Image: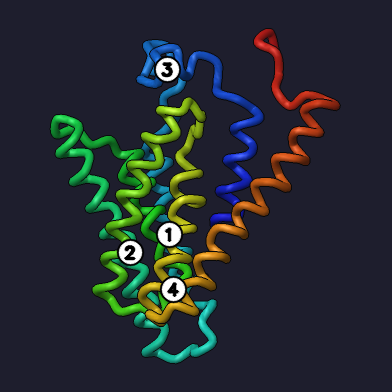
């Protein structure tokens, strides 16, 4: 997840924001409200729940101990993290947005929780998966706001969900699964160096393609 999220970050930095995205100085401009709004929230919700269903397959299917107890624990932790992250997003937005919560943010919150628990779903306890999910939800909210403030246009919230929550999931594995300094340092290095490598490689390659061919169409096109 963090590899793909870091690659997405490199792409949107080089590509730049959609035309009109930040006309309002980082807030939703009138043009954004009318032309850049999500195409279909029902389809987005359906896609999220299809992904959630698939998550049980690749989380439970990735364990080396394919026993009923192990698979059951993975499924439970995956469910709890997704629900806890959605809950955190709802509470955060409700308290800080005058009681208004948008569906797209909740959907990204669910995905953030699922990403956050992926690395450790077989080695943490259910109460720990709840905490991982809650932190993932907060990371999604803060990540979306951060990117908006620095005018990086992530149209679907992929960077907070996959890059930021992916890094958190790697760190959480070192904290909760083993609890010793060696494992935490190992997870710390891997969780940051792997997405950093992905970002650098994609940035260099895409920058070269942009210089040679151009990757953004003109306004006329």
Q: At which x and y percent is residue 172? A: 40, 68
Q: Residues within 10 Å of mark 4 (few under 14, many from 20)?
A: many
The reply to whether residue 57 is visible in this rendering is no
Q: CA distance from mark 4 to mark 2?
A: 12 Å
Q: Is residue 21 above or below residue 57?
A: above
Which residue position is annotated with label 3? 32
Q: CA distance from mark 4 to mark 1?
A: 10 Å
**Quadrant of the rendering where the C terminus is positioned:** top right
Q: Is residue 208 above or below residue 219?
A: below
Q: Quadrant of residue 25?
A: top left
Disc with the residue nearer the chain's start (3 vs 2): 3
Q: At which x and y percent is residue 105? A: 33, 40
Q: Which residue corresponds to the image point at 48% horizontal and 66% vertical from the top-left?
A: 170
Residue at far top of view:
220
Which residue position is annotated with label 2? 132
Q: At which x and y percent is residue 69? A: 37, 89
Which disc is residue 168 wearing? 1
The reply to whether residue 4 is visible in this rendering is yes
Disc with the residue nearer the chain's start (4 vs 2): 2
Q: At which x and y percent is residue 10? A: 63, 39
The kind of secondary structure element at disc 3 is helix
Which disc is residue 178 wearing? none
Which residue position is annotated with label 4? 174
Q: Is residue 190 above or below residue 73?
A: above
Q: CA distance from mark 4 to mark 3?
A: 41 Å
Nearer the observer, 220 or 93 = 93
Q: Are marks 3 and 2 in contact (CB under 8 Å)?
A: no
């Amino acid at each position: 997840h963090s590899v793909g999220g870091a690659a997405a970050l490199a792409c949107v930095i080089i590509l730049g924001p959609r035309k009109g995205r930040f006309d309002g100085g980082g807030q939703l401009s009138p043009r954004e409200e009318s032309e850049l709004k999500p195409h279909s929230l029902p389809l987005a919700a359906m896609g999220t729940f299809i992904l959630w269903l698939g998550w049980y397959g690749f989380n439970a299917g990735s364990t080396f101990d394919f026993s009923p107890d192990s698979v059951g624990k993975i499924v439970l932790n995956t469910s709890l993290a997704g629900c806890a992250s959605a809950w955190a997003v709802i509470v955060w937005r409700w308290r800080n947005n005058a009681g208004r919560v948008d569906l797209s943010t909740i959907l990204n919150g669910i995905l953030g929780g699922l990403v956050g628990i992926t690395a450790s779903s077989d080695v943490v306890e259910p109460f720990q998966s709840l905490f991982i999910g809650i932190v993932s939800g907060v990371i999604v909210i803060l990540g979306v706001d951060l990117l908006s403030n620095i005018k990086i246009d992530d149209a679907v919230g992929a960077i907070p969900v996959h890059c930021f929550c992916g890094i958190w999931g790697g760190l959480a594995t070192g904290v909760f699964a083993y609890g010793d300094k060696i494992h935490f340092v190992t997870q710390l290095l891997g969780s940051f160096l792997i997405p950093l490598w992905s970002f650098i490689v994609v940035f260099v390659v895409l920058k070269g393609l942009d210089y040679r061919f151009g990757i953004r169409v003109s306004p006329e096109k």
